[in-house]
Image (cartoon, rainbow, N blue to C red):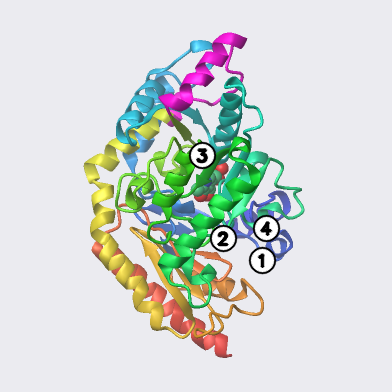
Amino acid sequence: ALSNSLAAADMAHTLHPNTNLRAHEENGPLVIARGEGIRVWDDRGKEYIEGLAGLWSVGAGFSQKRLAEAAYAQMLKLPYYHTFTSKANEPSIRLAETLAEITPEPLTRAFFTSSGSEANDTIVKMVWYRNNALGRPAKKTFLARNKAYHGITVASGSLTGLPVNHRDFDLPAIPVRHLTCPHFYRFGAAGEDEAAFTRRLLAELEAVIAEEGADTIAAFIGEPLMAAGGVMPPPAGYWEGVERICRANDILLVADEVICGFGRLGTPFGCQKYGFTPDIMTLSKQITSSYMPLAAVMISDHVYGPIADNSARVGVFGHGFTASGHPVATAVALENLAIMREEDWTGNAARLEAPFQAGLRAFADHPLVGEARGDGLIGALELVADKATKRPFETPGAMGRLASAIGHDEGLIFRAIGDQLALCPPMIVTDDDVAEIMTRMGRTLERLTDAAKA
Ligand code: PLP
């Protein structure tokens, strides 16, 4: 009865993000009631492995008491303070110091927001502000990629390269050029090998810069491994090439590490996996294991200098949020990063990469699987109507939704991105957990084959 009344209230009163709203009014929610380790339980008591760590984010798993204790202790001591006009609080100072220490060399300073979208909006504004300060107001355009996900607010949603996030929202609303998605399986041309694909992508980047004029292009933003668009690792040599071209044209390089950061790929940050060094980095999600909303923009001294000079000229850096440097969120992040180091999540991801990726690739022979892919502890299975031609299904997303429903029944939550099934388990998974995830995925695929035939 509780479940029914809860569901009815949800159907009547909530507008769900990223949801088919009319279908939701009919079918209702899956109400998740509690969590422990890598598992969650719904309000009917059914158990699921959370194969996507919530939204790619609950690294610590769902029952890390130390994070609750850190929040409680900070709430009793100083539940809130802001960081406007030089006010500061200890947890946010300590977190900025810690992030400067663990992120790659040139990144020295943190600006805090509550979400990845706000962080990427902040980056757009910071980069524009800096270029205005440097007397080059025309240097405004961002380069991004088709299928990128950088958030959902007006500026970050413009950087995102997914039609569903632009269509009917009148986006993009800022100057942005979206380049080819660097996913070889889908966008490699007939007869082209991966090295030739990389060369073509880099030639495209150079052509776009030549066409627009380097003096109009502010920055290139990319997820080291594109995650929410379908989990697509970059082709070999891609990031070194992008970095070289950006440096040659005075274009800032932004690594959106909202999903790849904090060990997900078996390296501390995703840029280290693929061998490039950004000027700016976006961090969120796993920074607190999503126990509190928090994000950080990390910048280098090179980026900071002109911004600071201009704030002195005009009297203020006129940008910030009520929750920038929130003491409870930053205290939880500090404790989370301490746990990350003690439990060696990065080492765990590096060690489990082999069985996790082998487990996924073992499904590559399945008749419905076109490609099994990923790096570290993140991966996806792309379902196709025809393996030989890579032909997608006639109704995109229908097979993914069906897989998702069967997965739920089998006790595995993954994310169906259209017909791509994404896995990104909590960082605390063990060998046995990985094996169990693959067992449940295997049962899901078997039943999907039968359902697809029916
Ligand atoms: N950047 C990346 C790479 C993301 O994956 C996401 C969210 O999935 C965001 C930014 C936006 O973060 P938020 O949903 O916290 O606004």
Please state which amino acid type lies under the numbered disc 2.
Leu
Can the viewer see residue 74 in this picture? yes
Q: Which residue sits at x=51%, y=39%?
A: 249
Judge whether 18 appears above or below 282 on screen. below
Q: Please give the label number shown on residue 30.
A: 2
Residue 32 placed where, x, y %?
51, 55
Q: Nearer the viewer, residue 206 or 58?
A: 206
Q: Please give the label number shown on residue 164.
A: 4
Write the start and end of the magenta stretch as one range: 300-329
Q: Which residue is mark 3?
A: 249
Q: Please give the label number shown on residue 27.
A: 1
Q: Nearer the viewer, residue 65 or 370?
A: 370
Under tag 3, what secondary structure?
Answer: loop
Q: Nearer the viewer, mark 3 or mark 1?
A: 3
Please state which amino acid type lies under the numbered disc 3.
Asn
Please state which amino acid type lies under the numbered disc 1.
Asn
In the displayed image of the protein, which residue is found farthest to the front? 210
Q: Identify the mark nearer the N-term, 4 or 2.
A: 2
Cα gap from disc 3 to disc 1, whole angstroms? 52 Å
Do labels 3 and 1 touch, CB within 8 Å?
A: no
Judge whether 15 appears above or below 398 on screen. above
Q: Identify the mark nearer the N-term, 3 or 1.
A: 1
Q: Identify the mark nearer the N-term, 4 or 1.
A: 1
The answer to whether residue 296 is magenta is no
